């Protein structure tokens, strides 16, 4: 997996790009939704095998889960502009699986669970896989993850957010 930092940054960027009026609640829910799929690591505590549909990178990383989750959050929290809210939450949630499918480790992502249980990676697997467990993250391996995420997640997000900021400033100065 990518780390919570990478997942959170992509969700923040998604919220800011898709909803120029994004409030703190939407940004918070987007970041939380991007991190949420990794709660499936709890499946290990219950003896659920990695490759089981409910195992790590299984159902919680699927398109269906992202859709259901975005509908639930939209119904509960989306007071106005429900479609924009749902799209931001959906894309933030599914971005988790997308980043995981670009990592150097694991056994793939179950994008199509429960309809099809195989796991998938993208051809471009450049993000260093993060170790499971916080104690292993503070190591040389964790440092490689941070460097990898800086190159392949943080810099592109920074470029996107900076470009968005410049265009907004330019638009305000024209008006």
Image: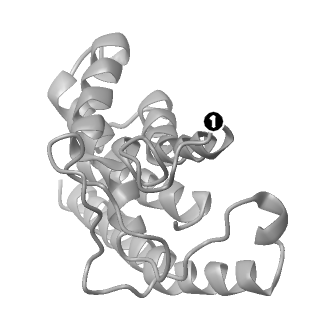
99 or 14, which lies in front?
99
Residue 156 at x, y = what percent?
A: 39, 78
Q: In this view, does 10 lie above or below 67?
A: below
For residue 22, which quarter of the picture? top left
For residue 42, which quarter of the picture? top right
Residue 110 at x, y = what percent?
A: 30, 55
Residue 169 horizontal side relative to residue 2, left or right? left
Residue 92 horizontal side relative to residue 41, left or right? left
Q: Is residue 58 above or below residue 1?
A: above
Residue 145 in view here: yes
Identify the residue at image location x=51%, y=50%.
49
Q: How many residues crowd mark 1 within 10 Å: few (<14), some (14–19), many (20+)?
A: few
92 or 59, which lies in front?
59
Identify the residue at image location x=43%, y=32%.
23
Residue 138 at x, y = what percent?
A: 83, 72
**SS under mark 1:** loop
Residue 15 in view here: no
Residue 133 horizontal side relative to residue 37, left or right? right
94 or 20, which lies in front?
94
Identify the residue at image location x=32%, y=29%.
69
Identify the residue position indicated by label 1 in the image.
46
Residue 85 horizontal side relative to residue 8, left or right? left
Number of numbered markers: 1
Residue 122 at x, y = what percent?
A: 26, 77
């Amino acid at each position: 997996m990518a780390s919570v930092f990478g997942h959170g940054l992509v969700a923040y960027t998604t919220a800011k790009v898709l909803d120029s009026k994004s409030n703190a609640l939407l940004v918070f829910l987007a970041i939380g939704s991007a991190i949420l799929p990794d709660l499936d690591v709890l499946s290990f505590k219950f003896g659920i095998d990695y490759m089981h549909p409910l195992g790590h990178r299984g159902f919680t990383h699927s398109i269906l889960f992202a859709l259901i989750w975005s509908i639930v959050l939209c119904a509960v929290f989306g007071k106005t502009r429900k479609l924009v809210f749902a799209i931001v939450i959906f894309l933030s949630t599914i971005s988790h699986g997308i980043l995981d499918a670009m990592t150097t480790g694991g056994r793939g992502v179950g994008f199509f669970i429960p309809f099809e249980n195989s796991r998938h990676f993208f051809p471009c697997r450049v993000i260093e896989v993060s170790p499971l467990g916080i104690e292993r993250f503070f190591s040389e391996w964790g440092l490689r993850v941070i460097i990898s995420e800086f190159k392949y997640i943080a810099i592109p997000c920074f470029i996107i957010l900076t470009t968005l900021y410049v265009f907004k400033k330019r638009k305000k100065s024209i008006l």
